[in-house]
Amino acid sequence: MSRTFPTPAIRRKLSSARYAYQLRGVDPSRSPSENFAGCTDGQWLWANTAGARNSARLRGSLPTLPNPGLQRSTTGADGDATLREGYRFYRLVKQSADARHPGGFKACRDVVDFGCGWGRMARFFLKDVAPERLVGLDCVPAMVEAATATNRWSVFEAIGPLPPAPVEAASVDLIYAYSVFSHLSEEAHAKWLAEFRRILRPGGVAVLTTRARSFFADCERLRLEGAQDAPGRTAADAFGDASRWRPRYDAGEFCHASIGLSGALDDSFYGETAIPESYVRRVWSQWFDVMDWVDDRSRCAQAVAVLRRPDQ
Ligand SMILES: C[S@@+](CC[C@H](N)C(=O)[O-])C[C@H]1O[C@@H](n2cnc3c(N)ncnc32)[C@H](O)[C@@H]1O
């Protein structure tokens, strides 16, 4: 029997020991960008997961996590699983900004995390963006409180469910929104796109996700198998009748299903949403140049649109 040596487990231990050694000078009294700016992205993910778990010094130099129930309520997972999903999107945003912003990702100084939730994505950008220039916005005050309580560096603000955002016109280089246009109604989504166009600088980039076509099959399976948890039951109710939704998606329609919520995320603007590429290219082009469409589960759990604000 042939075995690769070192085995994956040994390789993980070796890189863990190497990262711990390389990050031995981290100082909790300094900001994450001072401590971690020189890190590779691989080291950065390690620091945020195994590193923070095993080292009090690293833990004290990084955002903490809210309770697992709150993590799951917005992201469907907790701990390393939810952070890894966040990290994959962080990488994709950086790669997209590098390719599509006229100055690359390094020119993206003012950044908005739209629908920031408890701050899962913002924590990763602390390595690259000055914390006071990354603003997380969310319409659920409890999310903003959780993000603020777990991240003492970044700025988080509660906003209304519809524009305006408390952000000056043409003042932002990069906006990202993970799993927000996966929920907005057609009317709300159009209002926010127009608002993003207002606040982005010419050449500024927006990276937004929505439910992919494959989500219909996931919902159908959840319906047939009987979903165990509340998010699963919601998805099954929304798009579980895939034979009704898939033809609409394939015809380029905006697919939005109500999920009967009330409170800060009410039915008037919030549900489950899948927006097809053809709709994005046809309709979103009134505000943006549509640069890329990424529908590849090995890169992101959701479909991703990369947009650029034209000069005029
Ligand atoms: C599925 S969660 C994703 C949270 C975060 N982006 C992440 O990936 O960890 C969607 C977030 O968008 C926020 N949200 C939904 N509609 C919004 C709106 N109209 N304005 C601002 N935030 C909104 C919700 O409160 C929630 O925190």
Image (cartoon, helix red, strand yellow):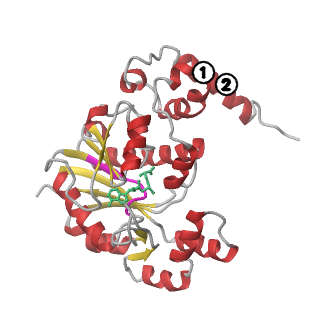
Q: Position of residue 237 (x, y in %)?
A: 55, 76
The residue singled out by tag 2 in the image is 14
Up/down of 299 relative to 40, above or below: below
Up/down of 45 relative to 311, above or below: above
Residue at the image point whose x is 33% and y is 55% from the top: 139
Residue at the image point whose x is 47% and y is 85% from the top: 247
Say if the magenta span includes residue 211.
no
Compared across the picture, whether 266 is left or right of 130 comes to right
Q: Nearer the viewer, residue 240 or 105?
A: 240
Classify the position of ligand 1 by quadrant: top left, top right, bottom left or bottom right. Answer: bottom left
Q: Residue furthest left?
A: 312
The residues tagged by marks 2 and 1 sit, at their Cα atoms, a distance apart of 6 Å
Q: Residue 299: tell me if it is visible.
A: no
| For the residues bearing labels 2 and 1, Cβ distance under 8 angstroms | yes
Q: Position of residue 16 (x, y in %)?
A: 62, 26
Mark 2 is surrounded, within 10 Å at the Cα level, by few (under 14), some (14 to 19) or many (20 or more) other residues, namely: few
Q: Secondary structure at mark 1?
A: helix
Q: Tag 1: residue type?
A: Arg
Q: Secondary structure at mark 2?
A: helix
Compared across the picture, whether 190 is left or right of 66 comes to left
Quarter occupied by residue 121: top left
Q: Position of residue 53 (x, y in %)?
A: 60, 29
Say if the magenta span includes residue 177.
yes
Label 2 lies in ligand 1 vicinity (Cβ under 8 Å): no
Q: Quadrant of the C terminus?
A: bottom left
Mark 1 is surrounded, within 10 Å at the Cα level, by few (under 14), some (14 to 19) or many (20 or more) other residues, namely: few
The residue singled out by tag 1 in the image is 18
Q: Residue furthest right?
A: 1
- Please provide the residue range marked out in magenta: 174-181
Q: Quadrant of the N terminus?
A: top right
